[in-house]
Image (spheres, rainbow, N blue to C red):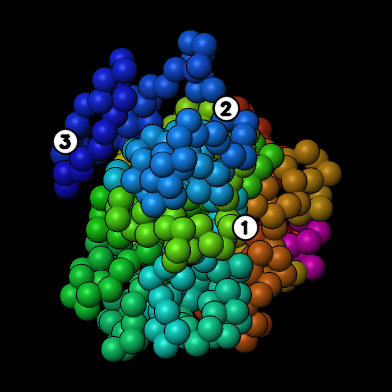
Amino acid sequence: MYFIKLLKINDTLFTMKDKNFKPANNIQDLQYFGEFGGVNPSISDSSTYTFLSAKTMFDTFEGNADGCYLYSRHTSPSNLYLGEALAAMEGTETANVSGTGMGAIVPALMQLCKAGDHIVSSRTIYGGTYAYLKNFAPGFNLATTFVDITKLDVVEAAITPNTKVIYCESVSNPLLEVADIPGLAALAKKHNLKLLVDNTFSPLSISPAQLGADVVMHSLTKFINGSSDTMGGVICGTQEFIDDLRNVNDGASMLMGSSMDSLRAASILKNMRTLHIRMKQHSANALYLAEKFEADGLKTVYPGLASHPSHQLFKSMMHPEYGYGGMLTIDVGSIDKANELMELMQERNLGYLAVSLGFYKTLFSAPGSSTSSEIPEEEQAEMGLTDGLIRFSIGLDNDIKRTYEIMNTCMKEVGVL
């Protein structure tokens, strides 16, 4: 698949048309100079911007003054730099950053759906997204049908005349189901729908826009930022869609106020420069542990394992150099065993009993009682989310063999092995 993107190299804009999409190269090739020649772009530490003429202010309000800034809720130079890098990574025309991941997901859906419309969504998604679709959106007469996203016939059967969007995660939270993005994209095209994909779990590894997705979103809070010190989100898509989101009269991102602070945008942009290195290490460590856990007889789910039902599908969509991602799960049978094991692993300095993901240390939680607690227990049971499931975001440990050996000891002490 071809993609076209403007890259700023040596102060000149070049059009790149590349059959072999290289997401890390696309980030690396973006070049910005700071105001005084700094190797990092200067931070626009202003909430409002001045104009030399009243007409230019009017034109900027109307969206007709290219390169001029009005007010930071619209955007800022720092936010645009970060958006350019994220669009380059995903291979979309442009992107709009937001203050949180939900600050990207909700406006993207609201921009495409109105009262009376319908969404077909994966049943296993981030708990906050599930709560929005299940509990909040119906108040605006926006309905959602939750389906097993891995079954294309089930997805198609759920489409109604009012459906506007198919929504999924590349790799689902927390069950690590893998979406057939090309297959879903074909369904979306067939029924004149938009395919929205949350790619938070698999940055660089999977490029949904290159596989046919219309809109790609991330919680920047996670792997992309990588240091668990800020929140952020992004919507990557066409210039037309992002312009619609930013419209002062009816743009969901503009009017819902989900803006990102310029200081945070600058910080995330700097962290993106090492994303390719970090994702390789997260993935390598996760694969090593997943293979060891499975060999120990633990019920282990990881897309890199041949036992994963969508292993071949993931393999067909991935950029191999970045691996299968840093997320894995094990099932230890009960919430009591899960809690005992997680507390002991934290005590032994193997990581933190904490939600979120993408940190340099391993993070672990029992999603049924934390990040997916918004999903009713009967629905958790139906989708296979047990109370003994532990979700791991594997860290950047240099000596993963030592990490495994200590984990193995902890598991034996609590009776998991």
Query: Whole-Å distance between the Cαs marked 2 and 3?
Result: 30 Å
Disc 1 element? strand
Q: Position of residue 343 (x, y in %)?
A: 81, 53
Asked if the stretch drawn in magenta spans residue 302, the answer is no
Q: Height in image: 400 above or below 166? A: above
Query: Whole-Å distance between the Cαs marked 3 and 1?
Result: 39 Å
Is residue 198 something one can see in this rendering? Answer: no
Q: Quadrant of the C terminus?
A: bottom right
Seen from the viewer's position, the closer of residues 44 and 303 is: 44
Q: Height in image: 29 above or below 90? A: above
Residue found at x 20% / y 70%: 189
- Callout 3: 10 Å neighbours few (<14), some, many (20+)? few
Of the two numbered discs 3 and 1 on the same chain, state the one appearing first in sequence: 3
Disc 3 element? strand
Residue 391 disc label: 1
Number of numbered callouts drawn: 3
Amino acid carrying label 2: it is Ile
Q: Position of residue 328 (x, y in %)?
A: 54, 54
Q: What's drawn in magenta, residue-wise?
A: 336-341
Query: Whole-Å distance between the Cαs marked 2 and 1?
Result: 36 Å
Of the two numbered discs 2 and 1 on the same chain, state the one appearing first in sequence: 2
Amino acid carrying label 1: it is Arg
Residue 152 disc label: none
Asked if the stretch drawn in magenta spans residue 338, the answer is yes
- Furthest residue in direction front, as rendered: 54
- Would you name the residue on which mark 2 appears? 43
Marks 2 and 1 in Cβ contact (< 8 Å): no
- Furthest residue in direction top, as rendered: 37
